[in-house]
Structure formats: C-alpha cells, structure tokens
Image (cartoon, rainbow, N blue to C red):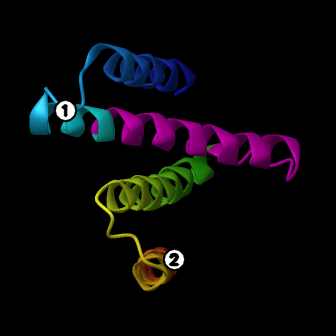
Amino acid sequence: MGFTTLLAGAAWICVIFSLDPYGSGWIGLSLFYVTLFAFLVGVFFLIGIGYHVWFVKQSLVLFREVPIGIRRSVFAAILCVETLALSAIGRLYWAVFVGSLLIIGALEFGSILLSRRRH
C-alpha cells in the first residue's frame, strides 16, 4: 500500500505541474481530483494502520483492520476532496460541510452495524 500511495502521490504531483487548469478543461480537473483522492486514501490508510501498530499494539490482528481502514480512509478522502471541490467553485458553506459530516458519519455507523450483524 505504501508503494501505491507513492505512485498516486507522484501522479498527483505530475498532474499539478504538467496540466494547465484553465486549458485542460474537465479532463484536467478530473485527473487532479482522482489522483488526489487515490493519494489521500493511501495516506489515511497508512496513518490508520500505523496508529494500530504503534499505539494500539494490534499487529497480530492487523489483517482484520484492513477492510475497516480502507473504508474509513475512503470516507475521509471523499470528505477532503468534496470540501476542496466545493470550495473551488464557491459552494462550500458550513451547512453543506456539516451535512457531509453527518452523511459520512451515518454511512460509517451503518457499516459498523452491518459488520456486527455478520459476526
């Protein structure tokens, strides 16, 4: 996952320095947000796994934390990219941000309930 995160970060840096945001149109913006999303998912996942290894000391049950870590990192990356995109178009208001937090919180709560029901 670390190597993939480095590749996504390198792709994001390449997009930043090689594409003109005004001349490339929607393709350039899409590449920017997709590569940023992939990079953030990797970074948040590695931070979460690092937290479990160094602070919680759960290295023996780490394989059970991988799906949870991926889900949480995807939610966090969605929130970051959504906030950045809405801010770029001037549509980021506190109510929209709080609503996004509530939706992501409800999705996380629902996924926790579903995972407990399966066990």
Residue 38 lies in what quarter of the image?
Answer: top left
Residue 59 visible here: no
Residue extent of the magenta highlight: 34-62
Q: Disc 2 residue type?
A: Ile
Q: Which numbered dot is residue 22?
A: 1
For residue 2: magenta? no
Secondary element type, mark 2: helix
Judged left or right of residue 51, residue 74 is left
Q: Residue at x 50, y 82 (%)?
A: 109
Judged left or right of residue 92, residue 48 is right
Q: Is residue 13 above or below residue 52?
A: above
Secondary element type, mark 1: loop
Q: Nearer the viewer, residue 116 or 45?
A: 45
**Nearest-to-viewer mark from 2 and 1:** 1
Q: Give the mark nearer the N terminus: 2 vs 1.
A: 1
For residue 41: magenta? yes
Q: Position of residue 42 (x, y in %)?
A: 51, 36
Q: Is residue 31 above or below residue 86?
A: above
Q: Residue at x 52, y 79 (%)?
A: 116
Q: Position of residue 57 (x, y in %)?
A: 86, 47
Residue on which the image places disc 2:
112
Q: Disc 1 residue type?
A: Tyr
Q: Position of residue 23 (x, y in %)?
A: 13, 26
Q: Nearer the viewer, residue 109 or 12?
A: 12
Q: Residue at x 34, y 32 (%)?
A: 35
Q: Residue at x 46, y 57 (%)?
A: 71
| Dot 2 crowding, Cα within 10 Å, few <14, some 14–19, many 20+ | few
Q: Position of residue 90 (x, y in %)?
A: 33, 64
